[in-house]
Amino acid sequence: GGGRARMADPWDDVNDVCVEFQGGHAEEGETMQVSSHVLSLASPVFRAMLTSALKEGQSKHVVISSEVGSGEGFVEFYAFLMPDTGREKTVRKRNVEDVLAFSDYYQVPVVKRLCEEFLLEQPPSVNLLLLAEARGLSALRKRCVAHVARDPETDLTQLAGKADLLLDVAKEMQHQLQYRNRYREMDPWAFRYREMEWHDREDDDPWSEQDADVGSSADWSEWQQWRDYGQQTEWRAR
């Protein structure tokens, strides 16, 4: 038998599209009634499907395979598109990968951006780096590359076969080493205590290019503060 996910009653009159889920854990004939207007306004992919001479536009029947996502995942995704529930929806750990998969596939940048903002708040990792690469999340990718390059104990076996990622990690390692050396040469005190601070913090790497513009006046001020702090700490210890 099949299951049917129904929306709120006020929408029944405008839910003119039947979405069918196939493969994976979907039950045979599992469907959901949705609005073509909501889909078309949010997604250029759905708009092309539902307003053209394609079979989906003629039959108002859309099939979603398990390779795109699950029925439960689509329910979460669709709630972000609805004018009455979209403002109340939040991205969470339990729904972020499903919502991201659908927003990426159906080209809904507003929802995709919400997913990336949430993931940027999570601890960077190789798994997140692979997800960022697969879904085209540039900010998350950059952050994870910096993190992976900083930690020499990171297991890179998951990146086997990912030549572009491995190359970017190697380049970032070089950048971080260059900036470390430049900081060390310009002010050993600032270098020492900046290293200590970031060692105690689970944060982005202080030596990545975007965080270490050696030539800026702001950096000179920061180095001075670090040096003063280091000298005072050493003086008190005597």
Image (tube, helix red, strand yellow):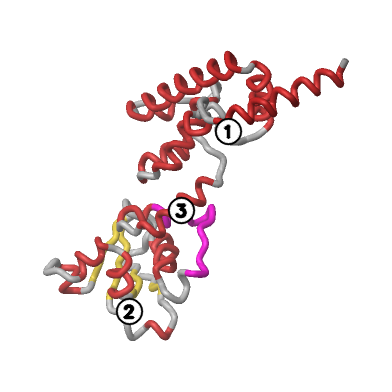
**Foreground label between 1 and 3:** 1
> Measured from the top left, where is residue 151 in percent x and y?
55, 25
Residue 1 in view here = no
Residue named by callout 2: 15
Which span is picked out in magenta? 87-100
In the rendered image, which quarter is residue 37 located in?
bottom left
Give the residue at the far left of this rendering.
Answer: 53
Residue 99 sits above or below residue 80 on the image: above
Name the kind of residue labelled 2 in the image.
Answer: Asn
| Residue at left offset 30%, top offset 60% | 22
Q: Residues within 10 Å of mark 3 (few under 14, many from 20)?
A: many
108 relative position to 215: left or right: left
Residue 149 sits above or below residue 60 on the image: above
| Residue at left offset 33%, top offset 26% | 163
Residue named by callout 1: 218
First in residue order: circle 2 vs circle 1: 2
Residue named by callout 3: 115
**Foreground label between 3 and 2:** 3
> Where's the N terminus, which quadrant?
bottom left
Residue at disc 1, secondary structure: helix
State the residue in front, 162 or 75.
162
Q: Residues within 10 Å of mark 1 (few under 14, many from 20)?
A: few
Residues at discs 2 and 1 in contact (Cβ within 8 Å): no
First in residue order: circle 3 vs circle 2: 2
> Measured from the top left, where is residue 135 in percent x and y?
36, 46
Name the kind of residue labelled 3 in the image.
Answer: Cys
Name the kind of residue labelled 1 in the image.
Answer: Ala
Residue at disc 2, secondary structure: loop
> Where's the C terminus, which quadrant?
top right
